[in-house]
Each structure stands twice: as C-alpha cells, then as structure tokens.
Amino acid sequence: MKKNPLTLTIGLLLIFIVGLLLFVYQVRTSEVVVVTRFGKPDRSEVKPGPYLRFPWPIENVHRFDQRVQNFEDKFTEGTTRDGFTLLSSVYVGWRIVDPKVFYPNFAASSEPIMAAEQLLDGRLSQAKASIAGKHLLTDFLSSQGEGNKFVDIENEILAAVQSELRTNSYGLKIEFLGIKRLGLPESVTQSVFERMQSERKLLADKLQWDGESEAQKIRSEADRRAADIIANASGEAVRIQGLGEAEAAKSLAVFQQNPDLAAFIFRLSALEGSLNQRSILIFDQNTPPFDILRGASTNLLHK
Amino acid sequence: MVEDQHTHDEVLESALDTPMDAESQALSEALRSSFGIVKLVMVLLIAVFFGSGFFTVGPQEQAMIIRLGNPVGGHRALLGPGLHWSLPYPIDEHIKVPITAIQKVTSTVGWYATTPEQEMAGTEPPVYGNQPINPLVDGYVLTADRNIIHARATLTYHISDPVGYVFNFVSASNSVQNALDNALLSAGSTFNVDDILTRNVTGFKEAVLRRATELLAKENMGIEVDDCQVRSTRPRQLKDAFESVLKALDTRGKTLNNARNYENQTVSRASADAQSLTNSAESDRVRMVNEITSQAQRFNELLPKYRENPNLFVQQRLSETMGRVLTNVQDKIFLTESTDGKPKELRLMLNREKPKPAAETKP
C-alpha cells in the first residue's frame, strides 16, 4: 500500500494540533499569567495573546484574573476626632498588576484572591481608623456648604492604603475606594431616635403655632382692609354729600330773596314731614288753629 | 489519547514498508483493516477538534469570542442567543456573560431588612417604641443633621462598552451596586432629614444620580445610566412622630384656609357695605338736591303771593298745613288751659323697659 497523501496530511495536522495544545497557551485580556519552571516563577505575561511554553511538567502556567475585584471590608467601629463612635465599611476595586510579585506572596493559599483580600481587610481597617481619628463627625455628616468632607475622607483612606501597598509591594493595586456603609453603634441609635422624636415634636408645634399666627395675621389684615374700604367709602359718601350740599347751596340764592318766607316754608315742610305717620300730637289751645277754640278768633268778631 | 494515536500512526507506517509474503500479507490485511479504523478515528478527532468550536447562547445571556486573547468585534462583540461557532482552543475561546439589554441594580445599604412577602405587601416589619437599630440587620442612611432615615436607590443602566464591562471587572454589576450605595450614602450625608423626605425629594434624587454617574464614569465601567429612582422614609420607630408633623401640617393648612376664607368674606362684605354707603350717599345727594331745587321752585312761585299780604299768607299756609297734618296724625290730645292760667303738667311714661328721661311736653 502506497503512502496516502490524505493520511499524511491528517497525521501532520494531528501532530500540529497536539503540538499546539502542548506548547502554546493563550492569555486573555482579562488575565495575567505567571509561568513557573520547575516550580520557580520564571516569567509573567500581562498582554493578551498566544505564548509558547514547555509542556508540563517542565513549565506550569498559573492564571490570575486581572480584572477589577470587588471587595468590601468589615463594618468596623472607629472614633472621630471629637469622640463620636462611627461604624463604617468601605468597598474597594482592586486588581493584580504584577503577577510575578503577586504569585509568591499568595501562592501558598489555595485561594490567592481571598488571601489577598484578607490582607486588604487588615490594611483597610487600619487606614479607616486612622483617617476617622483625624476628622470631626461634621466632616462625615453636614450639608454641602458646611464643610462636608465625605469625598475627601474617601480619598484620604485610599491614599493611606495605597502608600501602604506601595511600600510593601504585593503586586496589586487599588483602583477605587468608597464608603459603602456608615452607621452608629446600636445603643446610640436609640438616643438619636429620642432626639429625632423631640425634633419632630418641636416641628409639629412650630407648624401649629406658625399656622395660627399666620392665620391671625391674615384675619387682622383682612379686618384692616375691610376697615380701610369702609373708611374710604365713608369719605367718599361725605364727599358726595358735600357735592350735594354745594349743589344745593346754589339754590340758596333763590331763598335769599326773602329769608322769612324761606324759613317759614322750611318749617312747614319739616312739620309736615315729621308728623306724617303714626304720631301722637299733644297740643294746647294756644296752638293754631286750635286757638280758635279759646276764642282768639273772636278778634275777628270784634273787628 | 491524542499522543497514543500518534505513536500508533508511526508503527503503521513502518509496517507498510516491509516486503510482502503470505504471513506478512495476512499481517498487512489485519493492519489494513485496523489502519482503516485508525483513519476513521483520526478523521473523527479532527471533526471533534473543529466541532468543539460550536456553542449555544441562552436567552438570558450573551457571548463573546476571544481570539488569541483579544475579544473579537470590539464594541459590537456581543453574540445574542442562538448557535455560534468559533475556532477551537487555543486560537479562539468563547465566554458567556449573563447580560440582558436593561440592567438594574438596587442599593443594598440604607433599607431595613424585609422579607419578599413584606416587600410585596408593602408592609414594614414591626418594631416597638424606640427600639434601637442593629446596624447588622437594618441598613440606614445618616443625614447631614445626624438623623437616621431609610433610603433605597434603584439604578437602571445599559452597557455601552461590553468589552470594558466584561474584561475590566470580575463582577461589574457588583461594582455598579457599590457605586450606587456610595452615592446614596454620600448624598445622604449632605442633606437634612426634611429635605430628603419632603422638602427636596428631587434634589436628593439628583444628588444620588449625579454622584453615581460620576463614580461610574471615573471607574470606567462602560455603562450608561438610564434612570435612577430613590425612595426614602422615616425610621419605623418614629412613625407616630413623623405622622404628627404631617398632621400638624394638615391642621396648619386648614387653619390658613379658614383664615383666607374669613379674609375673602370680610373684604367682600366690606366692599359691599362700602358700595351701599356710597350709593346711599349718592341717592341722598340726589334727593337733597332735588328737594332743594323743588323747594326753590315752590318758593319762587309763592314769593309773589306772600309779598301781596305776608300775614294772611302765613296764616293761610299754616292753617292749611295743620289741617293736613292733623288728618294724618293717629292720636290727638288736646289740653285745655287750667283755670289759674298756668300751663297744665302732663306726665308720660315712655318705653318702660329702657328708662329714659321722661319727655315733658311744655306748652
């Protein structure tokens, strides 16, 4: 039987594939790799791509996730500069930047990431405590205008941990850090509640009194406006009256011709006007025309 | 296993080179048949090798192909649900990521512990009086005026840079959640309790959103925030206290409304009164002017007659008027002169209920 070119091709291909599997490995973007030769770290690869290796047992490839790991430390107590106890926990995003340094530090553990996080936990607690001790409670909690330093505090903790990690190189780097929880000791919350309760009471009372005094203000303002309106109207009425009188005064010239007659006519009409309804008139015999009953009119007879 | 196959292959090739005899022919027969099997196995192996590149993507996930360590396709690298193929390892690799179009995270700090049932029913776990909060059980947010409240933020976002989202973060959604928690906390630390709960709810929400967006941008998460919802409430322990403030607010509103009603009524009544005042003044004026005018007219008519004989005229007018007046008067009392010529005294009792100086009529 002759050599079959197809068989040869397939054979070569298989050799190639096996070689590929044995001598080539891939580094992903998300990974960093440490290659150990006979157990000793030989080189590390940070850039993604295919790399050559000697097959096991000569060389061993250790892969580490180089993506940002989330870690949250314990909720621990700290004391502020002004003596308040504050519970806090922070989160960090950290990543392995130098696997060759990272590997020997944490290789002993079966979970190198967790071992590294344990280390971080300790460092973070220290940094938190020391930074909290430098700040007042109002630096954590106060409105924007009153010197809230929330973000500054985070940056200070980050700087402290970072400098710590720089001096003792662990091959890892903290990308970002933030406060995740803030709290008060359980016993303190009760007194906070009591304070809040009295604040609420004050607020409720204030609202009530404010409302009442506001209402009072509205009422008295209304009364004042009403009085103003009436006063204005009275003034207007007087003015109208004056107008009428001025107009009437024009007619006085007519009466000037004979004031006696005018007075007489006015008195007559006043008399008539005052006695026109349901009135009782008491008079004696001197009142004309009843003087006639007394015999005053006998003058006429004597004439 | 592949290595085994490799060595078999070499054995076969050397066997085929030897000259043939009856024995070796039998051997070659046997070898040929086994060689056929080996060929089949080799073809199968190749097929398996390339077939290993097939993979499926489920409905709640997406996939990416990594060629020689780098993601294929840049920003549009995500493969949707279905069957896909990549070159076999070590050239290509594929990874699956649980990504849906819209991502949603809810803050984990700041809210009291609830069960899903309570969450559904919208009820709060019971507390007694001023029961202190155990920070390990119930979350809360400390406000700028050092009060305790509960707040919860929900952030909706979509992934704008899937490569960054997947290859920069072990758990990107956890990172988003951390940023959201931090945003909630830091915003809470700058707002007073009343601003968060009532006076400036939107302002607080915007502060949370602003801080979260800022953090996410700084951390290069490769996401875009769509929406942020913030819910906040008083501690359950202080339900009554907070309600009393609401009640006071309500009462205040009512009191003010009453006052405003009073204001409206008073002012409009005053306006009406004022109107009637001026109206009556106006009508008085008209009447007075008319009266004077008509009297002047009458005077003008009477004056010539009076001038003719003033005395007679007066007598006549007087008697005439008296006559008219007396017919109208209801009661007339006529007093005769007493015999001694002095005027008679007449006493009248008027308005017994309200004593007033008794009017005396004098002749």
Image: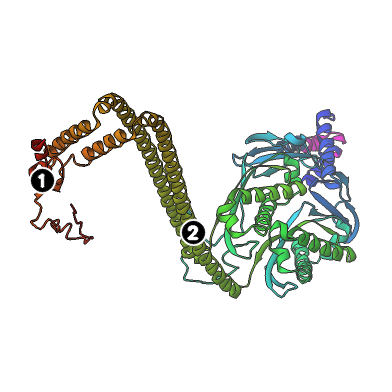
Query: What amino acid type should be assigned to the residue bearing mark 1?
Result: Asp
Identify the coloring: rainbow
Above or below residue B258? Residue B5 is above
Chain where mark 2 sits: A
- Specify the quadrant of the image occupied by residue B20: top right
- Residue A32 x %, y %: 83, 51
Instruction: Answer with the quarter of the image where residue A62 lies.
Output: bottom right
Q: Is residue B35 left or right of residue B225?
A: right
Rendered residue at 14%/48% (across/down): A283
Question: What's drawn in magenta, residue-wise?
Answer: B14-30
Residue occupying the point 86% across, 49% down: A46
Determine which quarter of the picture holds residue A161.
bottom right
The residue furthest front is A303
Residue B248, position as x, y percentages in the image: 46, 59
Residue occupied by mark 2: A213
- State the CA–CA distance, disc 1 to disc 2: 60 Å
Q: Is residue A183 magenta?
A: no
Q: Residues within 10 Å of mark 2 (few under 14, many from 20)?
A: some
Say which mark, if any, is on residue B331: 1
As drawn, is B252 to the left or to the right of B298? right
Question: Do the residues at pointers 1 and 2 share their chain?
Answer: no
* B28 within the magenta span: yes
